[in-house]
Image: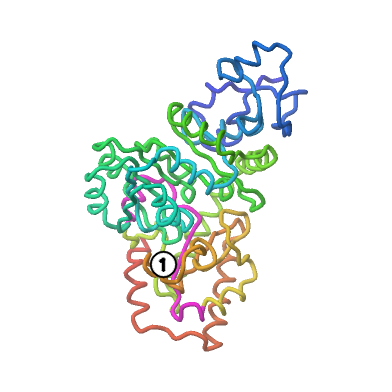
């Protein structure tokens, strides 16, 4: 029987190989080829002294599944390999991961600097929950790196970055903002959900803590919730302690589902990104579309930054239709190869307006203040054939035009030409 590769064998391995073999270089019980789902709540020891050493972390092993679980530990090892991290901690959802990291590193009297463009749930923590604990929050204009740097220079304990942002696909210059944060000794946290570890490794760019909603592209099948946090062992020990006491642990069955999904991440993203680019280019030509958001478009305001720090541009596209929600209500139900749902990263294509997906927690006034119009639609591109997705979107827009349910703004094509300038190159 061939021996499984050791962890050293993964050092120079490609991301596809690490996604398959990460965390699984040891023999499983009964010589199983797949990670077992260990559903035990507790783990027993005949030797009381050994039990005590394991409980204190002086010896390897497990005590109670809220603290650690063999299946969950395999998942943590797999994301650790993909993000090139020392350690990782799994959570019951992406929001559990985000909130736990913020509450791990922030206390009364501290200050956090972030941007106005972030996932709606994250924004709610900044706007509603952290201020209750006496944490000062400053949210800057996402495109204004100078403003972000000025606010960081005033002093803060944590800088929170989300790039590309959800759902506007804005891109932050990670290394530039990390440099500003390090000058004041702040911990830098980055949400890498949209990019995935295949397209962006924030730790390699100087970030301290990386967060993923594993519900999305990592699991890839829209059937499980999970969150993952990566970083140094010193920082992850603090995050792990918070999880142990606050209880947002990932269950072993969900961990297994995410492990299984991650093994095809490279294959899925290859097709999804190809189709995302094609849909973005088509949307640039659609008269009913006012603007298109995709970092891979040459006219994207942060295209150069995206090219410098990302190896691919992801599978999320967003666009704004003229006529606002009236147009959205006609367009989306006409699609044949798409779910209208509040999720992303699955093998099926998913469409949704921000008001019912990324920013459903926010009021209309809050969304408008964040620059999110009622006509903004997010596409999570699936693995379907590219031509089928293009034809589907084209026929849906054709139906909207023929139904007379949307008025085309006079300046629509001008804004599109600016967004998509140089697309032929």
Q: Quadrant of the N terminus?
A: top right
Q: Where is mark 1, residue-wise? A: 366
Q: Which residues are magenta?
A: 302-327
Q: Residues within 10 Å of mark 1 (few under 14, many from 20)?
A: few
| Quadrant of the image occupied by residue 7 | top right
Asked if the stretch drawn in magenta spans residue 317, the answer is: yes
Q: Is residue 14 visible?
A: no
Q: Quadrant of the C terminus?
A: bottom left
Decide if residue 34 is on the left or right side of residue 172: right
In the picture shown, does residue 175 fall above or below 422?
Answer: above
| Quadrant of the image occupied by residue 104 | top left
Residue at 65% from the left image edge and 24% from the top image edge = 63
Asked if the stretch drawn in magenta spans residue 421, the answer is: no
Q: Secondary structure at mark 1?
A: helix
Residue at 47% from the left image edge and 31% from the top image edge = 236
Q: Nearer the viewer, residue 132 or 404?
A: 132
In the picture shown, does residue 85 fall above or below 281?
Answer: above
Indicate the position of residue 85 as horizontal and vertical percent values. 46, 31
Indicate the position of residue 110 as horizontal and vertical percent values. 33, 42
Decide if residue 91 is on the left or right side of residue 109: right
Q: Is residue 132 visible?
A: yes
Q: Residue furthest right?
A: 30
Decide if residue 223 is on the left or right side of residue 166: right
Q: Nearer the viewer, residue 79 or 415?
A: 79
């Amino acid at each position: 029987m061939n021996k499984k590769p050791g962890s050293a064998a993964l050092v120079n391995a490609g991301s596809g190989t690490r996604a398959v073999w990460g965390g699984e270089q040891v023999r499983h019980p009964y010589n199983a080829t797949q990670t077992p789902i260990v559903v035990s709540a507790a783990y027993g020891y005949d030797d009381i002294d050994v039990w005590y050493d394991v409980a204190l972390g002086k010896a390897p092993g497990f005590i109670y599944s809220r603290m650690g679980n063999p299946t969950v530990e395999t998942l943590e090892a797999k994301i650790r390999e993909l993000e090139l991290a020392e350690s990782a901690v799994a959570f019951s959802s992406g929001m559990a991961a985000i909130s736990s990291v913020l509450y791990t590193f922030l206390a009364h009297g501290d200050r956090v600097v972030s941007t106005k463009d972030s996932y709606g749930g994250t924004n709610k923590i900044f706007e509603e929950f952290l201020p209750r604990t006496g944490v000062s929050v400053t949210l800057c204009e996402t495109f204004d790196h100078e403003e972000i740097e000025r606010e960081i220079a005033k002093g803060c304990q944590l800088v929170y970055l989300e790039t590309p942002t959800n759902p506007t696909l804005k891109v932050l210059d990670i290394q530039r903002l990390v440099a500003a944060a390090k000058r004041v000794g702040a911990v830098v946290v980055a949400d890498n959900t949209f990019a995935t570890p295949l397209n962006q490794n924030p730790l390699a760019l100087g970030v301290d803590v990386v967060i993923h909603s594993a519900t999305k592209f990592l699991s890839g099948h829209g059937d499980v919730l999970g969150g993952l946090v990566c970083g140094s062992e010193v920082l992850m020990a603090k995050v792990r302690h918070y999880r142990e006491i606050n209880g947002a642990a990932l269950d072993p069955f969900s961990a297994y589902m995410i492990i299984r999904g991650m093994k095809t991440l490279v294959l899925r993203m290859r097709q999804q990104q190809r189709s995302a680019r094609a849909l973005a280019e088509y949307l640039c030509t659609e008269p009913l579309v006012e603007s298109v958001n995709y970092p891979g478009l040459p006219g994207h305001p942060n295209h150069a930054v995206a090219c410098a720090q990302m190896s691919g541009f992801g599978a999320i596209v967003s666009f704004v239709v003229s006529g606002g929600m009236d147009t959205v209500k006609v367009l989306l139900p006409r699609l044949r190869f798409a779910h209208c749902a509040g999720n992303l990263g699955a093998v099926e294509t998913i469409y949704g307006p921000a008001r019912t997906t990324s920013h459903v927690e926010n009021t209309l006034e809050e969304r408008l203040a964040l620059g999110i119009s009622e006509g903004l639609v997010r596409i999570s591109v699936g693995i379907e054939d590219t031509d089928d997705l293009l034809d589907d979107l084209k026929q849906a827009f054709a139906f909207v035009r023929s139904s007379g349910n949307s008025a085309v703004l006079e300046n629509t094509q001008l804004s599109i030409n600016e967004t998509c300038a140089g697309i032929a190159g």
